[in-house]
Image (tube, grey):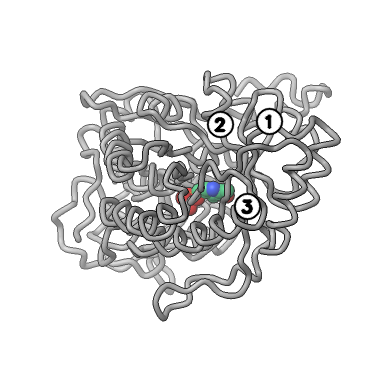
Amino acid sequence: MKKTPFVTLQQVNEICRQYPTPFHIYDEKGIRENARALKKAFSWNKGYREYFAVKATPNPFLLKIFQEEGCGVDCSSYTELLMADALGFSGENIMFSSNATPEKDFLLAHKIHATINLDDFSDIETLDRLAGIPETISCRYNPGGSFTIGNSIMDFPANAKYGFTRKQLTAGYKLLMEKGAKHFGLHAFLASNTIANEYYPTLAKILFQTAVELHQETGAHIAFINLSGGVGIPYKPDQQKNDIFAIGEGVRKAFEEILVPAGMGDVAIYTELGRFMTGPYGGLVATAIHEKKIYKDYIGLDACAANLMRPAMYGAYHHITVLGKENAPADHVYDITGGLCENNDKFAVDRELPEIQLGDRIFIHDTGAHGFSMGYNYNGKLRSAEILLKEDGSFQLIRRAETPADYFATFDFTDFFKNIKN
Ligand SMILES: *Cc1c(COP(=O)(O)O)cnc(C)c1O
């Protein structure tokens, strides 16, 4: 399917009069419509709730949109917990799914009454010693081996650092019950960015079956099953979008087949989606500032991997549109680069695009999740602004761009940079 940006050149030029490139821009309408479709797809389940994975796009304005749409948040660190609490998410609307967890993180999660999803058997003792075991607690499951859908191997949980083994789950639930836990959650995340409507239903079957066993083995009351993240998005134009209604229906069937006959039809389904919630509804807008022709043709942008790391880190494909040239023939081949002193700082390699002139606005698609948030300051590059394209077509600054003063702020105990004023 042809990928079309959710902003036009005209809109971008208007934004640029106030806020120079580069910036990430988000589509409020797309985010809300998608969140509503997700909710509808799981409306068959009475307790259903999406806990948006904060790490995907930790912007308070976007979290407020999810709050308005009835979502909770999934946090994995101290600062994410602080953010959720400050934005008025109540304890039951905060899931804490961490790993290698510092003690102060557990203490804060406990203090704000977040639902804690333990990553390891040893966390039981740690949490008990620090704060006591709450009545509602969750454990993350790692089934080991390989995870397959039909005949295709999706991932290798045996190599993943997360979760309890199957035996540890039984022992863990028993120990938690001894320490006062009354209501249990079960969580697993077995494959990332899946473009297959079968992912959630396949995972659900594994978790539902395990929940029935755990209930039989320990007598524990299973209150919720958390399917976590992993529902993907089509980064490439030839990829098929997931059908969230087919996914919800697949999970419902597994629920009817496994949980209902076991007398566990009151279990709530939770999700912790990140990429699916914001990925397609964000774009990185940059300007072509340099062209060079050596052994290949390069276009240099004012954005770099510090603003979007996925291509450099994973060789990930992000579609690119030259704004205003949506319908021009793609009769040039370019490497589209940032300016880091790192040869992997390329948003695209050998990409067929229309002829690019300096000053052209470049829209890099699908940066709404794990885009801005993976940013860093290598080469003294600064994090960009974030802009919200509102439902009525107006735009709002939702994070200002970093300034040199921000970059030097961690040296504020010295005098070296005190005269730097941006
Ligand atoms: C990253 C993560 C998510 C979100 O994953 P997506 O692939 O963005 O949907 C959810 N839960 C946990 C525990 C995670 O680490």
Residue 310 visible in the snapshot: yes
User: Is the C-beta of the residue carrying label 3 under 8 Å from the nearest atom of ligand 1?
Assistant: yes
| Residue 303 horizontal/vertical position (percent) | 46, 45
- Local SS, label 3: strand
Residue 61 vertical placement versus 378 (above, below):
above
**Residue type indicated by callout 2:** Ile
| Residue 112 horizontal/vertical position (percent) | 65, 23
Q: Residues within 10 Å of mark 1 (few under 14, many from 20)?
A: many
Residue drawn 72% across the image and 42% down it: 177
Q: Nearer the viewer, residue 152 or 233?
A: 152
Label 2 – label 1 distance at C-alpha: 9 Å
- Local SS, label 2: strand
Instruction: Quickly name the residue at label 2.
Output: 94
Of labels 2 and 1, earlier in sequence is 2
Of labels 3 and 2, earlier in sequence is 2
Instruction: Quickly name the residue at label 1.
Output: 109
Circles 3 and 1, Cβ within 8 Å, touching? The answer is no
Q: Residues within 10 Å of mark 2 (few under 14, many from 20)?
A: many
